[in-house]
Structures are given as C-alpha cells and as structure tokens.
Image (cartoon, coloured by chain):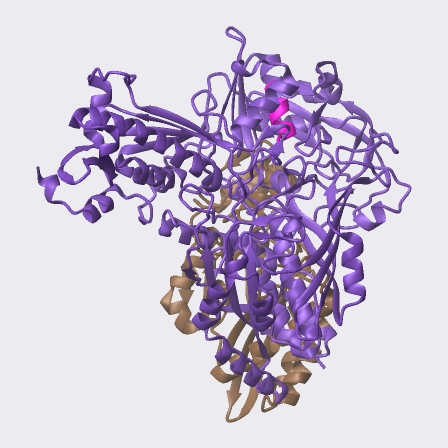
C-alpha cells in the first residue's frame, strides 16, 4: 500500500494542466478527489509518474442552476447534498449522492472524478445517462461536448482523450418524478445493482421515462427500450414488467463477491421495479 | 474526622470497586489521539522492513534475484531463507507443535507467504525494493479443499516425513496433521443407531479473520553494546513471546525485553509469532539499528492468523419427546499451510469438546482431523476461547435441526435439555466439569423479555401474509443459549509451548496510600487498567482512582501467559484478588499493632481495619500504608507489597441467552435486525459499563461473521476478500441496537466469582444471527445453509426453496 515515487503538480489554470498533459502524455494523470486514483497508485496498479492535482484550477467548482444545470468537475458529493437550489431543481442528484460511500468520502469525491474515471461501479455515470447530460471536455484542440450516453466504452475506457480534461457536466433541469435506488452490501460499497429513473406524467399516463443502470455491465447502461416500455403506459404491472425485461436484456453483469449472475439479474429487476414505482409515485 | 460519619456504603462507593460503572481510565488518551501504538514508536536511525510475498498459493521457488533491489536508493539488505539458514532461523516453531517457514524455503504454500525481507531506510524505499526483487516460481497444483487434501497425491509439506507422527500423534496422509478424539465412540454410535429420532447435518463454520483495526507489527532494537534486545510489538502474550524469541534466537531471556505498547484490538490475531518479528530481529542484529515492520491491511487479512474453517459433521439423537440421548461430531479442520493454531498443547482442536453446549447429553463423541491446505496458517481463537465459538455454533445449529426433526419449538427443546441448576458442578460426556450455571432462569428471563410467544404469533401471521402475497419479507427468530469455557487454564492440563497457563499480579502500595499493580496480561482495548484497579480497590480498600495498572513490559511485569481466550479476568483477575488479600493480611497485622490489639481483634471494613465491637477505633488503609513505611513494627518487614501467581483450579463457564429478531427480504437477500437481546451471565460483574461495551463489540463481530465476513479463496488459492471493500467490517451504519441484560451466577472457585465476558457475545451471537436466518425459512423446508448469510446467499436460500417463482 505504498505508491511508487511520483511528481506532484498543482497548476492554477487549465492552460497549465493542458501543458503538463501534453508534456508528459501517458505518464500524467489528473486527479480530482483522488478516491479512485490514489488507492490504485497505492496498490501499484496505476503507474502515474506525474500527478496533476486539479484543486487549485480556477473555474471547476461552481453549480449553476437554471433551465440548464451545470456542475463543475470539482464539485464534491457533499456540495451536491448541501445545495438547496440544485436539490429543488434536480432532487435525484441528492438522493444518489447520499448513497455514495460515506460522509468522509463524499467530502472529497467529486462529480468530475466520478464520471470521468469510467469505473462501472461509480454511481454518477448512470445518473448522468439517465439525465441525458453532456460532458464538457477541454483539450489541446479546445473544448467539445460528449453526451454521457456516448461517453463510456468499457471499464475505465471512455471517449476522453489522454490529453483532455473533463471540466463540467450539464443537463436540462429534469421534470417529473425521480428515484435513485441502490442495493449495496454495506456502507462504502459499490452497488450490487442500482438504477436511476426519471419519469414524466400527463394525467394517468407516463409521457416519458429515462432509465439507466449502474454496476451491471462494464459500463453504465442507458436502456432506451426500458424507457420506451413505460412511455405511453399507465405504469401498471404489465408495463413495469416490460420495462424491467427490456432493461435486463441490456445489462450483462459478471459474478463477483457480491454474487453470481443469476442473483444480480434478479436483484437488478427488483431494484429497477422499486425505482420505477417510487419515481412514478413522485411524478 | 469527617470520615467518621460516612456510612460504609458511601465509603464503598467512593472506592469505585467491584460493581461500579467506573469510566475507563484509558479513554482520555485514546479519545485525544495520545495513545502509543507500535507504529508510533520512532527510534534513532530506525530502518523499515517489508516483505516480498508470493502471488502464487503453491509454487516451487527456482530463484530469487536481489541485485536490482539492492540498487534501489535506501535499500540496505534483502534477506532470504538462504541468509537465515546459517542462523537456523529460516524456520520457526509454531504454537501448535508444528514448524513454519520464516522465509520461503524452496517452496511457498499460500498466497501472500513471506519470500524475502527488504530492509531500507524508510518504508517507501522498502516498497520500491520489494518491486525490484525478482522471484522465479514454478507453479504447483493448488489444494484449497481440505477433503481433497486428504485424497490427493499432491504433497504440500515436503519437509515432513510422510509416515512420521506429528506433534499430536499419527498422521493418516501426507497432508493430514492430527486426529484428536474425545468421548466414547462406540457407545455414542450405538445410542444414535438405536435412537427414536436422529438429526444429521454438515455444519460449516467458514474461514474468517479477526481483523483488528491496528494490524500486526513490531520494532526490534538490538543494542550491540550491552547485548540487549528490545522488541516492541503487537503481542497479546508478551512474556511468551520473550521466551519464544529466546528459545529460537539463543539470546538469554534476561537480555530480551518485550514491550506491548497500546494495542488496537487483538481478537486472537496477535497471539502467535510471525515471520515479521523474526526478520525484524535478525535485521536489527545484522544492521545494528532498530528495524520496524508493520503489516498493511492486505498483509493482515491474507497472511496473519485466520480463524475457524471447521467442517463439522454432526448427528444428534433424541427420544420422541425431545430428550437428547447422544451427540456425535466429526470435524475436518482446515489449518492452511502450517499448523499455527494457538491452542494449549494438549488441545490441538482447542476446547471443541465443549460442543455438548448447555445441554445434559449423556453420551457424546468428537473427532477432529487437522488438514494442511494451500491457505494461510492460523486457526486462532477470534474473540473466543479456543474453538469454543465453533463448538457453540455447531450445537446451536444441531439443536435447531433436531427441533425440525421433532417438529418442536426450538426454545422448548432447549428448555427440556438444559443442565439443571442442581446438577452443577456438572461433568460433561466430553470431559469437562462445568463449574456453575442456572440456564433455566436465564432462558425464561430472555424469552419473557422479548415476548417470545407474541413473536411466534406475529411470525405466523407474517407467514400467512407472505403466502397471500401481501409482503415479501419473512420474520426470523434466532435463538441461542451458549456455554463458554474460558480462563485457560489449570497448569495440570493447560500449557503453551510447555509454559503453564497461570497468570500473575504484583502489587506495590506506596507510602501515601496509592498503588501500582502489574500483571502478566495485556489489554488490547478490554480496559484492564480500569477493571483490575476495581478488583483491587474492593480487596485492599484504596480507591481505584489511586491505583495504576501496568502491563506489557516484560522487564517490569510479572510473568504471565497474556490476554486471549477470555482468560484475563478468570486468571489474572484472580491473581489480582489473591495478591490483594496478601496485602490485606499484612495490613491487618500492621493495624493491630497500631491499635494495640491482637491481630484477631481487628476486622476489615471496606477501606479500614476496625477493632471488633469498637467501630470508632480503626486505622484506614491509607494510614496503614504510611505506617508500613515509617514504623518499626516488631516481626514485620517494612513496605507493603505482594505478588501472586494464580493457577486456576478449573476453567470458568460463562453462559448466556441471546435472541435475534430479523426481517429478511426474500427478493434482495437483505436483512434488518429488528431486535437483538443479549443476556450474559459472567458471574460477578466488575464493571457493568465495560461489560456492556464488551457485549456490544462482540455481538457486532458476531453480526459480521454471520452476515457477511469471510476469507474466501478461488480454486487457484487467490484470496478473494483481501481488502475491506470485500471483507465485511461493520460500521455504525450496519450495526443494530442491542439490548443487554444479565443474571449473576458466581463462579464457585474464582476468588471473586468472576468468569470473563469479552468473548461470550461472539460465541453466542453468531448462532443467534444464523438461527434467525434459518428460522425465517424453516416453514419452507430449510434445514441448514452455510454462513455467511450475505445478500446473495440468503437470496439463494429463497431461490432454492422456490420463493421467487
């Protein structure tokens, strides 16, 4: 649990970050909260000769709430939990953040780190897919945005280039009912299964549903078919079963200490059913 | 004097002696970050050592190349078995009569085994040095299943002559360690064959780890000028460690000082001797500088002393009315690569023969086969007396299975089979003399406290609701009545490495009426400095607040066998009381002299000696202490000191009744503990607050074990649960509320009637949690399912019973 030697950099602006990244290429990694990267370095599973700490970089820590919500990459889970404007506008964020790790980790862990790392166990990527968020990336060729739903390629593999930095996430203020439902073995654990659901309603009919699943494949899974199964329905038992069946067809869990595949498939269905039921009750 | 008008009750209360919920004197430093743990020790010029460990569970070592490591800045030395061999230190004796490699000698037997020891100027350099050591391995077939180990041609321990006896008798197979038996085989089998009802089950108590918050470590400092070795470390038995170090190093025992500083939890993990200790000592001798070695969490979970891993096949027989007639048990014990269990020498399976539990079982037989596998060595008593938790889990599961067979309420089945109060002292079929007990009183109190009959009605209603589709949660009522055997132990049959398991206390009363007491034990969080002062306060009439308790420094403390197996109060606590009585006897003579009466004409009254029939004539213990140092008393030496080495006449037998009420979600496998009631009878209660804390801690560890904690291996012998992400250590979030209660049945042979309590809650808690899970599914036909009852395994129970279709 002792990392190899590394150089620690602490630039104060994005230009400084980008110049370090272009200078050191693969040998450099940016660090936000460090709660994924530092353990990997201590286990010597990540070789990072140049560590670039983002905490002094200007402009990465704001939360803007309007029709579009923008959250800076260095905003912590604790900031999300404490932000009343954000909670009023997009309450699913607080509900999800409260289920991430424990208070000590939430004071350090950031939105940017959580979404950019590409760890299938992280909760924010699926949530961002549910919200159809856009990720802003800054690199040597300037700024671009990538939809959360297109960002994840495989475990720890994302659309982000080695010389790019994820600076913020943004999404339209969600409407309707919401739920983030997560089963975990204990505090601090990744999900056995988790799902994020946003639903809108007109009269007794569901007008739209967005569903994403966490830690049930090597990437977060946005299940378009699951949402489609609910849209236009009255969200009765048949519709929920159809949505669950669609979501289960999209996921591909693997066996680990949390349990075998059959268990995870079963629990994924239960958790999603609960999430849909709760989101619908709030719609 | 104002003192004159104080009632004896007031004076007694001001002593804060037996029965006082005195606040822990240790906590001021612990809560302010002022504890002094081994990793806080920093000596001038101190070096740091760390291990190259094998990634393979079974492999031959073809070569070890250290040249590159020695080029790493800060790396001073790399020790291998070849370096230790000329000193005869490449192997070391284990506490179980086996021997263990200090550094891999030709092969490795489990993942994480120590291969080379890198010594460097700091721990970062040591870690870099480890990376640079090149080891060439040839993989060998891996055996992780103890049953497979007894059939395979793969020989794990090539150092042992295949046909030769082991430390505990004949070996049946090259991977077999010992067979240990208790009770009557033939009679028991006859009784079971002829019985009206027999229940049979294989009960596996899975491999777990004590996982103290502070891992193991040491600082070895060899002073080459005066030839004295000082070894600071996380030792639950510092005096025994001194003797072991002397025996294997050849350094005379007076030249070795072993110090256990503050210890952050032990739970059995810190009883044994580890390669890190030997390598640190050697490195200090070689370099002439102090050398520190501290495990990280993964090292600790993967290599130092696991616990349990017992496969217990059982048969229990009864009459149709439920009177138990016989118990049979065959245990296959997975000891890993070396037999490094920490048990008294004559008990290679510990006190597993307490497995008749709280019940009057006339005939019983137990056999235990110890087996080598490609897993880490250990087999320590994790918050229990030697193998007592395995025994208690076994019998408490067998009782439940028998209740199913008899179609009987499990509480009632227990009641009709308990040993009766008037049967004590009770001789069990497997050879123990239970000193005291009153099980029926405790049981009835527990059942009443939880409202047992109403709970059963609620459970029946819940079952109906479940079948009607109104709920997906089942209700389980987990019962457990356990009997512990602690306080090892009588020297006539208890020793470790030939050292009798007595313990000791030495007391010095200072002239102004305060005192210091030193003991052969060592607190790892138990609060000895608080409770032993209380024992003494009641014995010698000086306030507990005026008594310092010191342990853990072998240069100052009297010899003792240390703290594990709930032995501190039964053995060292007894020594403390006996030493106190010696003080009091001398004080009586001094008081009689001062009061100018005969010795027999004064009597002890809380904190003073009074003249019989003239209570206004007295001398307080404080006055007597001063007189001991300033008066020339004919026929009495000056000073007021005493020492006692206590050899207990018997073990003590704490018991308790635990009940767990649990909700189980059949779809997710999640559980919720709705109620946990713990009644403990530990005899005389020294400090009720500390008892309550001990119970909370022990039940929480029981919760961990029953509901999730495990050291699991894959088929290649890789540890799957080597970090706290996967190894379940409960936090406040997972820990339920506990209700504690007690009865008091003093031990008849212990000077103050105390029995020990630290481990009872783990022994009794595990079956209570596990039985709650089983009880919830009993109506659907579940007989037994192995722990841990984590989410997926509970889900699997439900799935196998068809509850998801």
Give x and y (percent) for residue B178: 78, 40
Q: Residue furthest right?
A: B153
Observer-nearest of A20 and B286 = B286
Q: What range of the chain is rendered magenta? A: B272-281
Give x and y (percent) for residue B416: 59, 69
Give x and y (percent) for residue B406: 69, 75
Query: Which chain corresponds to the colour brown?
Result: A
Quadrant holding the C terminus of chain B: bottom right
Compared with B409, B238 (above or below) is above
Observer-nearest of B340 and B536 = B536
Compared with B457, B728 (above or below) is above
Q: Which residue lies furthest to the top in this view?
A: B225
Observer-nearest of A163 and B644 = B644
Residue positioned 54% across, 62% down in the render? B420
Compared with B73, B460 (above or below) is below
Give x and y (percent) for residue B382: 58, 46
Q: Is residue B617 magenta?
A: no
Observer-nearest of B256 and B724 = B256
The image quarter in which residue B643 lies: top left
Specify whether B515 is left or right of B731. Answer: left
Residue positioned 66% across, 32% down in the render? B95
Q: Which residue lies furthest to the left in this view?
A: B1
Q: Is residue A78 visible?
A: yes
Query: Which chain corresponds to the colour purple?
Result: B
Residue positioned 50% across, 79% down in the render? B453
The image quarter in which residue A185 lies: bottom right
Main secondary-structure element of the magenta-colored stretch: helix
Specify whether B446 is left or right of B382. Answer: left
């Amino acid at each position: 649990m002792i990392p190899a030697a590394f150089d620690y950099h602490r630039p104060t602006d994005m230009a400084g970050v980008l110049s370090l990244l272009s200078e050191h290429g693969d040998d450099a990694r940016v660090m936000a909260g460090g709660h994924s990267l530092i353990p990997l370095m201590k286990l010597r599973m990540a070789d990072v000769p140049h560590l670039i700490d983002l905490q002094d970089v200007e402009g990465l820590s704001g939360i803007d709430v309007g029709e579009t919500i923008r959250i800076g990459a260095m905003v912590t889970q604790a900031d999300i939990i404490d932000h009343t404007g954000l909670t009023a506008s997009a309450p699913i964020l607080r509900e999800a953040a409260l289920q991430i790790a424990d208070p000590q980790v939430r004071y350090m862990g950031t939105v940017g780190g959580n979404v950019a790392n590409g760890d299938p166990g992280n909760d924010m990527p699926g949530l961002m897919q549910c919200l159809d968020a856009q990720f802003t990336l800054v690199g040597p060729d300037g700024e671009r945005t990538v939809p959360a739903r297109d960002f994840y390629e495989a475990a720890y593999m994302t659309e982000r280039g080695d010389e790019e930095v994820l600076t913020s996430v943004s999404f339209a203020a969600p409407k309707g009912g919401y739920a983030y439902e997560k089963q975990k073995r204990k505090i601090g654990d990744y999900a056995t299964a988790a799902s994020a659901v946003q639903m809108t309603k007109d009269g007794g009919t569901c007008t739209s549903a967005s569903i994403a699943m966490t830690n049930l494949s090597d990437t977060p899974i946005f299940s378009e078919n699951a949402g489609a199964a609910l849209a236009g329905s009255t969200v009765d038992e048949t519709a929920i079963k159809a949505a669950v069946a669609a979501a289960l067809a999209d996921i591909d869990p693997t066996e680990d200490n949390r349990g075998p595949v059959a268990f995870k498939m079963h629990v994924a269905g239960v958790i999603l059913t609960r999430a849909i039921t709760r989101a619908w009750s709030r719609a | 004097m104002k003192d004159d008008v104080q009632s004896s009750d007031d004076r007694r209360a001001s002593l804060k002696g037996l029965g006082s919920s005195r606040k822990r004197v240790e906590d001021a430093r612990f809560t302010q970050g002022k504890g002094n743990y081994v990793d806080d020790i920093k000596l001038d010029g101190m070096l740091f050592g760390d291990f190259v460990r094998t990634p393979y569970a079974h492999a031959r070592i073809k070569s070890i190349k250290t040249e590159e490591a020695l080029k790493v800045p800060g790396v001073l030395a790399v020790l291998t078995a070849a370096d230790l061999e000329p000193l005869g230190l490449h192997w070391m004796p284990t506490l179980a009569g086996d021997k263990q490699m200090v550094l891999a000698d030709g092969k490795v037997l489990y993942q994480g085994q120590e291969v080379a020891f890198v010594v460097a100027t700091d721990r970062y350099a040591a870690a870099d040095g480890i990376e640079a050591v090149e080891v060439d391995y040839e993989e060998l077939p891996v055996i992780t299943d103890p049953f497979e180990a007894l059939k395979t041609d793969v020989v794990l321990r090539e150092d042992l002559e295949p046909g030769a006896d082991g430390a505990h008798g004949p070996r049946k197979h090259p991977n077999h360690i010992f067979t240990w038996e208790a009770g009557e085989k033939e009679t028991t089998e006859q009784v079971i064959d002829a019985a009206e009802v027999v229940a049979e089950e294989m009960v596996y108590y899975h491999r777990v780890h004590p996982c103290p918050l502070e891992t193991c470590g040491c600082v070895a400092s060899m002073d080459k000028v005066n030839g004295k070795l000082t070894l600071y470390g996380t030792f639950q038995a510092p005096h025994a460690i001194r003797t072991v170090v002397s025996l294997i190093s050849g350094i005379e025992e007076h030249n070795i000082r072993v110090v256990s500083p503050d210890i952050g939890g032990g739970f059995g993990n810190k009883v044994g001797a580890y390669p890190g200790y030997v390598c640190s000592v050697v490195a200090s001798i070689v370099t002439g500088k102090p050398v520190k070695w501290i495990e990280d969490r993964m090292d600790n979970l993967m290599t130092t002393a696991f616990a349990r891993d017992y496969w217990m096949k059982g048969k229990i027989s009864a009459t149709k009315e439920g009177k138990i007639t016989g118990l049979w048990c065959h245990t296959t014990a997975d000891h890993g690569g070396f037999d490094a269990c920490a048990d008294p020498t004559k008990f290679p399976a510990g006190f597993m023969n307490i497995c008749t539990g709280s019940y009057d079982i006339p005939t019983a037989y137990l056999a235990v086969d110890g087996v080598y596998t490609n897993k880490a060595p250990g087999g320590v008593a994790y918050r229990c007396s030697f193998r007592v938790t395995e025994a208690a889990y076994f019998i408490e599961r067998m009782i439940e299975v028998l209740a199913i067979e008899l179609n009987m309420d499990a509480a009632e089945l227990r009641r009709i089979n308990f040993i009766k109060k008037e049967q004590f002292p009770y001789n069990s079929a497997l050879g123990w003399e239970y000193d005291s007990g009153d099980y029926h009183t405790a049981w009835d109190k527990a059942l009443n406290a939880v409202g047992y009959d109403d709970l059963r009605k609620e459970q029946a209603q819940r079952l109906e609701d479940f079948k009607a589709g109104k709920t997906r949660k089942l209700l389980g009522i987990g019962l457990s009545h356990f009997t512990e055997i602690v306080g090892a132990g009588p020297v006539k049959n208890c020793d470790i490495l030939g050292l009798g398991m007595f313990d000791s206390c030495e007391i010095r009363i200072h002239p102004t009426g305060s005192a210091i007491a030193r003991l052969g034990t060592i607190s790892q969080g138990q609060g000895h400095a608080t409770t032993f002062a209380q024992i003494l306060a009641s014995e010698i009439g000086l306030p507990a607040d005026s008594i310092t308790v010191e342990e853990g420094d072998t240069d100052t403390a009297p010899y003792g066998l240390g703290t594990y197996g709930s032995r501190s109060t039964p053995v060292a606590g007894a020594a403390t009381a006996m030493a106190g009585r010696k003080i009091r006897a001398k004080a009586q003579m001094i008081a009689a002299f001062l009061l100018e009466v005969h010795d027999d004409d004064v009597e002890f009254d809380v904190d003073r000696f009074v003249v019989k029939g003239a209570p206004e004539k007295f001398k307080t213990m404080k006055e007597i202490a001063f007189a001991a140092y300033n008066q020339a008393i004919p026929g009495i030496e000056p000073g007021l000191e005493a020492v006692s080495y206590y050899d207990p006449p018997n073990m003590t037998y704490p018991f308790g009744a635990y009940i767990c009420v649990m909700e189980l979600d059949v779809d997710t496998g999640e559980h919720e503990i709705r109620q946990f009631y713990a009644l403990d009878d530990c005899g005389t209660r020294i400090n009720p607050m500390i008892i309550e804390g001990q119970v909370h801690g022990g039940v929480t560890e029981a919760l961990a074990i029953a509901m999730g904690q495990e050291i699991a291996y894959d088929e290649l012998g890789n540890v799957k649960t080597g970090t706290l992400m996967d190894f379940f250590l409960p936090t406040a979030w997972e820990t339920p509320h506990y209700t504690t209660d007690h009865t008091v049945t003093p031990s008849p042979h212990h000077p103050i009637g105390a029995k020990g309590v630290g481990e009872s809650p783990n022994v009794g808690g595990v079956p209570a949690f596990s039985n709650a899970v089983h009880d919830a599914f009993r109506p659907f036909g579940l007989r037994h399912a192995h722990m841990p009852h984590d989410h997926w395994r509970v889900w699997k129970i439900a799935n196998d019973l068809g509850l998801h279709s």
